[in-house]
Image (cartoon, coloured by chain):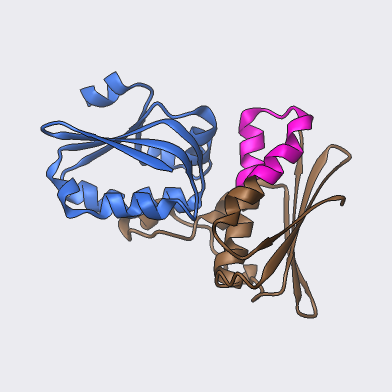
Chain colours: A blue, B brown
Amino acid sequence: MKIVQNADSNTLTLGLDGELDASSSVLLDAELTQPDILRHQKVMIDCQKLNYISSAGLGVFISHLQRFQDAGVKLVFFNMQEKVHNVFEILGLDSLMTIVPTQQEAAAL
Amino acid sequence: MNHSLRVSCSRQNLKVVRDFVGEFLAEYGLSAILQNQIILAVDEIVANLIIHSNHEDESKFLDIRLAVENNEFRFEAEDGGASFSPSGYQDPDMEEHIRQAKKGGVGIALVNRIMDHVEYSSVGTRNFCRLTKRLG
């Protein structure tokens, strides 16, 4: 798992590249735990190169969502592969998290 | 079951197991979604066995066996760690998980929702987990 960061004045974009499992999710958790992340108005997760997610990967997002919401930071997923989106759907997380098709739509939120 | 793999109880081996299942399933021409679901269910069980049952002790091993019979995928894992007790398991409330910022506890829900049959058993000190899923 590689995480590519791209920040402008109020938006942080994290590009996830690889597979998010019980081994690699530790890296993403450390990234989202950084206090500075809450200075952004929006954190956009680019899932184009995210080829796999397990419950450990979902757990990272589940465990930070409330903290983001409490701080007024929007968490938005985009470019998600169908098979990865299906994993969110199985648990009903697609209706509890903001997932949009394209970067343009994520930026417009 | 003639496709088998033995791995030590390290998280690093989760990728090894997923690739093993993916290569095994390749010849069946499954949709990307179904193939990913089966790999996910196996990954969740193996992660639980490595992390919770065997506490990531790399001197311990898991045996994994795969088969397709009568258009049904069959998975078996055998280990000698602490046995999993499904009787204490409750299906998670996702909104509650988000409110309580929980990191874990949704893997078995994924397995139960994806697979047709999920069974845990023990014979002496050996524990077995068996999963089945019809392939279309």
Identify the residue shown where x is 64% and y is 73%: B59
Q: Position of residue B19 (x, y in %)?
A: 65, 43
Percent position of residue A15, x then y: 34, 34
Q: In the rendered structure, which segment of residues is drawn in magenta?
A: B19-40
Residue B27: give x, y in percent of width and height. 78, 31
Which residue is more in the foreground, A10 or A24? A24
Query: Is residue B41 shown to the viewer in this render?
Result: no
* The C terminus of chain A sits in image quarter: top left
Q: Residue at image x 58%, y 72%?
A: B57
Residue furthest out toward the front: B59
Kindly give the residue lying farthest to the bottom in the view shown.
Answer: B124
**Is residue B26 one of those drawn in magenta?**
yes
Q: Looking at the image, which is closer to me, A25 or B133?
A: A25
Residue drawn at x 73%, y 32% is B26
Horizontally, residue A43 falls left or right of residue B115, namely left
Q: Residue at x 35, y 21 (%)?
A: A102
Please state if A90 lies on the left or on the right of A15 as rendered: right
Q: Give the left or right position of residue A74, taking residue B42 as reference.
A: left
Q: Is residue A10 left or right of residue B65?
A: left
Q: Looking at the picture, does residue A20 appear above or below residue B64?
A: above
Where residue B30 sits in the image (x, y, percent)? Answer: 71, 29
What secondary structure prevails in the magenta region?
helix
Q: Is residue A34 magenta?
A: no
Residue B43 lies, with reference to residue A7, above or below; the image says: below
Split into 4 quadrants, where in the image is the N terminus of chain A? top left
Q: Is residue A39 visible?
A: yes
Query: As rendered, which of B80 and B45 lies closer to the eye?
Result: B80
Residue furthest top in the image = A104
